[in-house]
Image (cartoon, grey):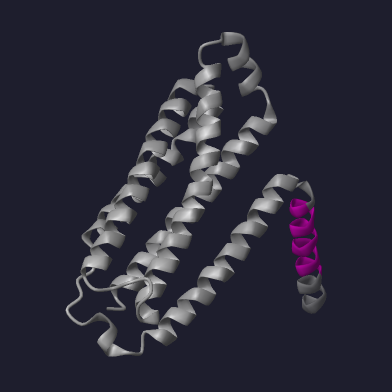
Amino acid sequence: MMQNYHKNTEKTERDNAIARLEKLHPHKTLLYLAIFGSTLVFLFMIVSYTISHRDPSAFINFEFPKAFVVSLVLLLFSSYTMTRVLPAFAKDDLKTVRNSLGVTLLLGVAFTISQYIGWSELYHSGIYLSGKASGAYLYVISGLHVLHLAAGLVFLTVIYTQMSAVSRDPVKMLIMVTNPYQRIKLEMLTAYWHFVDALWLILFFYFLFSF
């Protein structure tokens, strides 16, 4: 009896999971698949970096870039401002949505600049892209992350521009808040942005404790 109960429960949970996947918007499905693929790529690169890092002479007299610390703080703040978007949209408060997106955009650009400064610090510390493999991986992995962030910035810029244009027209505002796909786009942007933030958080502490 108990065994049948567990089997029925597992079947119900499996059916519910399948039903949720079927209801998932195709664009969301593609986004989650892309996030999964990117996660595998970074995992592979971290493993490769770990193997190459066995040479203890690669980072003699090396100090962790202070700009990377600044970039972490900037990205954490951007994650907070992004969390305000969906609740504000649910309340039809497009002004807060627009402002939150704008601040997130500025923080994203500031993060990119801080990464460039961090690479400059690496260079002046004697860590070169064309040097030892362990040093080159720092540039490659952090650079690949910036490319992921750049994709998010493009998406963010498009939505911010739309919000700015709509906020001046009450009719367009009404159409936007009643359009389900607008919320889906914001959900996708939020999910992707938090993924990029979490990714850098993991990479930051991995790099920090690897030296």
Q: Is residue 105 visible?
A: yes
Q: Residue furthest left?
A: 61
Above or below for 29 versus 37: above
Q: Specify whether 126 is left or right of 109.
A: left
Q: Quadrant of the C terminus?
A: bottom left
Please identify the dominant SS of the magenta region. Answer: helix
- The structure residue drawn at horizontal position 35% and vertical position 41%, both measured from the top left corner, is 107
- The structure residue drawn at horizontal position 82% and vertical position 75%, both measured from the top left corner, is 4
On the image, the x and y values in percent for residue 22 come to 79, 51
Counting every numbered tag in the picture gives 0
On the image, the x and y values in percent for residue 187 come to 58, 41
Q: Is residue 147 magenta?
A: no
Q: Specify whether 31 is left or right of 25.
A: left
On the image, the x and y values in percent for residue 67 come to 25, 57
Above or below for 82 versus 19: above
Q: Nearer the viewer, residue 14 or 37?
A: 37
On the image, the x and y values in percent for residue 2 come to 77, 76
Q: Residue furthest top?
A: 170
Q: Quadrant of the N terminus?
A: bottom right
Q: Is residue 13 magenta?
A: yes
Q: Specify whether 87 is left or right of 80.
A: right
Above or below for 42 versus 67: below
The answer to which quarter of the image holds residue 15 is bottom right
- The structure residue drawn at horizontal position 59% and vertical position 58%, both measured from the top left corner, is 35
Q: Specify whether 103 is left or right of 211.
A: right
- The structure residue drawn at horizontal position 55% and vertical position 40%, both measured from the top left corner, is 155
Above or below for 136 versus 163: below
Q: Nearer the viewer, residue 139 or 176?
A: 139
Q: Residue furthest front?
A: 130
Q: Is residue 93 visible?
A: no
Provide the residue span drawn in magenta: 8-21
